[in-house]
Amino acid sequence: MDYQRILDRVHAAVKPIIGTGNVASYIPELAKVSPAHFGIAIVDLEGQVYRTGDAEVPFSIQSISKLFGLTLAFHLEGDSVWTRVGREPSGTPFNSLVQLEQERGRPRNPFINAGALVVTDILFTHYAARGGAENALIKFIRKLADRPDIGFDRAVAESERRTSHRNAAMANFMKSFGNLNNDVNDVLEAYCRHCAIEMSCVDLARAVTFLANHGVVPWSREEVLDKSSAKRISALMLTCGTYDAAGDFAYRVGLPAKSGVGGGIVALMPGECGICVWSPALEASGNSYAGSIALEMLTSLSGRSIF
Ligand code: GLN
């Protein structure tokens, strides 16, 4: 597959729509990012990299961290994760509170904020005495991306922490239902740092190749998840990875994916490659507008998807 030619075609085709939508502004630091960025990268299972545009520019991974957090928690705890968080699409915005009351503090899935706060609580319990949840997650991501200098942006983490009233409401609410074991502020702090991790499209495409390779990091041969667990995480990406737009995204793109309000979307073609696209202007559900169109074009032009 001539992915470089396809990426170049996709880049040329999306140029007129780059910047359509709105850059996330409810986290003040993110509002400073230019909507004119666009990058896309593919890393195949042999480690070959295809890229175009701003594919090497680091950006705030935001909710894409939820994918790595869940992978680490699932690796540590297996199915017991599901006693505290569900596996159904929410059909509501990523920061919605409404279902939490009806469902007694058990979030619908790990890829909305409430679910990721529970996952962060699990990681906090495991790692508080061993250097902290954020350090554990960063170390884990460094290993997946094969890049030792990945870290989080302190200004973004603090900007989010200062304005995380909704996430604080969710965390307190879940605590009242007994679904948060650690101190609410500690969990929020770790969560905001996870969201503030900075990576480029190339880093992220590389970091998700283990999911395209049945749970095994292709270059180190390390099994992060067994084959069945990798299938399960990928299935959740398809059904829940792009919030309340997941149905439309599956229809248009046909790949398991996870987005973040920094404008990044990771996706994978099982057995083939990891993919990441970045363009900061978002559609109403909080997914990159140009990014999702680029992924739709990629699967249309390549004829590859999971279907
Ligand atoms: N840090 C963001 C938040 O908690 C992440 C949301 C997202 O990327 N969808 O609101």
Image: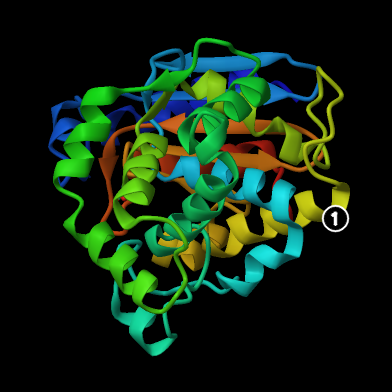
Left or right of residue 283: residue 300 = right
The mark total stands at 1
**Vertical order, 84 against 54 (above or below):** below
Place residue 272 in its image quadrant: top right
**Vertical order, 171 against 202 (above or below):** below
Front-lying residue, 307 or 64: 64
Residue annotated with mark 1: 228
The residue drawn where x is 12% and y is 37% is 28
Quarter occupied by the C terminus: bottom right
Q: Position of residue 32 (x, y in %)?
A: 14, 27
The extreme bottom residue here reads 102
Q: Position of residue 189 (x, y in %)?
A: 32, 42
Label 1 CB-ligand 1 distance < 8 A = no
Place residue 251 in its image quadrant: bottom right
Amino acid type of the residue that numbered disc 1 sits on in the rendered structure = Ser
The extreme front residue here reads 129
**SS category of the residue bearing label 1:** helix
The residue drawn where x is 55% and y is 47% is 123
**Vertical order, 71 against 218 (above or below):** below
Q: Is residue 36 visible?
A: no
Q: Position of residue 51 (x, y in %)?
A: 54, 16
Q: Is residue 172 visible?
A: yes
The residue drawn where x is 83% and y is 27% is 222
Quarter occupied by the N terminus: top right
Q: Position of residue 155 (x, y in %)?
A: 21, 25
Front-lying residue, 2 or 148: 148
What's the coloring here? Answer: rainbow
The residue drawn where x is 60% and y is 70% is 87
